[in-house]
Image (cartoon, rainbow, N blue to C red):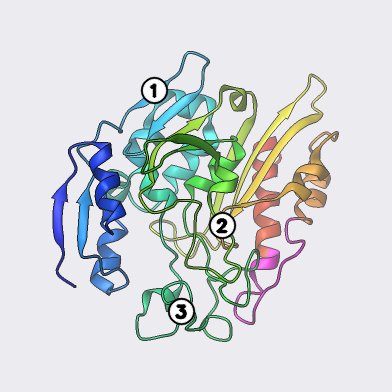
Amino acid sequence: MQPFAYAAAPDVATVATRAMRGAEFIAGGTDMLQLLQEGVRRPEEITDINGLPLSSVEEEPDGAIRLGTLARLQEVADHATVRQRFAVVAEALEATASPMVRHMATVGGNLLQRTRCLYFRDVTTPCNKREPGSGCSAWDGQNRINAILGGSEACIAVHPSDLPVALIAVDAEVLIRHADGAEHWVPIEDFHRRPGDTPHIETVLRQGDLILAIRIPAHAAGRRSHYVKVRDRASFAWALASAAVALRTDETGTVVEARVAAGGVATKPWRLPQVEQALLGRRLDAAIAAQAAARATEGAAPRHGNAFKVPLLRHTVERALLELGGFA
């Protein structure tokens, strides 16, 4: 591990000042410490932001839920309003890592979790995400866990987090504070970037930016929702495929609003509008679930080691729909 300077930030403005000169942030540290130990990150300075007043979980007057960026994953998963009104979020968090990690990791940090691609974590191998222009070793290498959606010739690394997949299903937004003090909300669907030819740029954040909060709008509470995660072992494993589904139906059971997103299969949390479209105006049953899920892999581009993810994603989306509808 490379030596670095360490300081705790007394306020948000100090964080921005230090970030502009190249300091990196640490909060829960559940991912950062691994990256430091593996030599993937080599900052000269780390700023601890745990002392900032950004850890609350609050219900706003209009019924929305606001999660401070430093709120711990388990705290959010256990929050009564989240569990009752936004089940998909609580379920995704409960499927994340282990209880020990969930009590340390923050919601803001989880959005920024780095890929588990073998080559990104191995500093002895070429990786465009870690070292731009060096090449993508996963393209023809060990790519079992890599992406079948959203990739490019420069990168097929999967985004590993569960939470942002669920947040797509509830139309969440991310509040960003810029170095100049300006703030604005970004839809979670637009927060992460596809790799293109710049895979090292993973989000819309710029130097000096800080995530302040995540907001789940009240209208999403009208949808029934569910999260399904398929992985190699029952706990503390990243998704091979996951699905977040949220549906609103009318008095006849017809789907009038749908949100479907996938994780573990794409270079960013991946919305599936073609599946949503296949559900709208239909009454959910086993046949409709299968027909809609069949569209989940449109545009997929598997490599030799991860072609199994094509049928796996379809089955995962179908299972999520069936379980949500009470057919499984």
Report which residue position mark 1 lands on: 58
Taking the image as shown, residue 232 lies to the left or right of residue 311, namely left
Q: Name the foreground residue: 205 vs 248.
A: 205
Graded by Cα atoms within 10 Å as few (under 14), some (14 to 19) or many (20 or more), the crowding at tag 1 reads: some
x%, y% of residue 237? 42, 61
Identify the residue at the far right of this view: 281
Q: Which residue is mark 2?
A: 193
Comes first in the chain, label 1 or label 2? 1
Secondary structure found at label 3: loop
Magenta-colored span: 296-311
Q: In what element is the residue under mark 2?
A: loop
Viewer-nearest of labels 3 and 1?
3
Give the residue type that dot 3 points to: Cys
- Residue 141 seen from this side: yes
Query: Mark 3 to mark 1: distance in Å?
Result: 40 Å
171 to the left or right of 254:
left
Q: What is the chief secondary structure element of the magenta stretch?
A: loop
Where, by quadrant of the figure, is residue 88 drawn? top right
- Tag of residue 24: none
Q: Residue at x 82, y 51 (%)?
A: 291
Q: Position of residue 110 (x, y in %)?
A: 40, 49
Residue at horizontal 61 percent and vertical 28 percent from the top: 220
Q: Residue at x 53, y 85 (%)?
A: 141
Q: Earlier in the sequence, mark 2 or mark 3?
A: 3
Judged left or right of residue 227, residue 51 is left
Label 1 amino acid? Answer: Glu
Rendered image: mark on residue 127: 3
Q: Is residue 119 above or below residue 194?
A: below
Callout in the foreground (1, 2): 2
Q: Is residue 67 above or below residue 4?
A: above
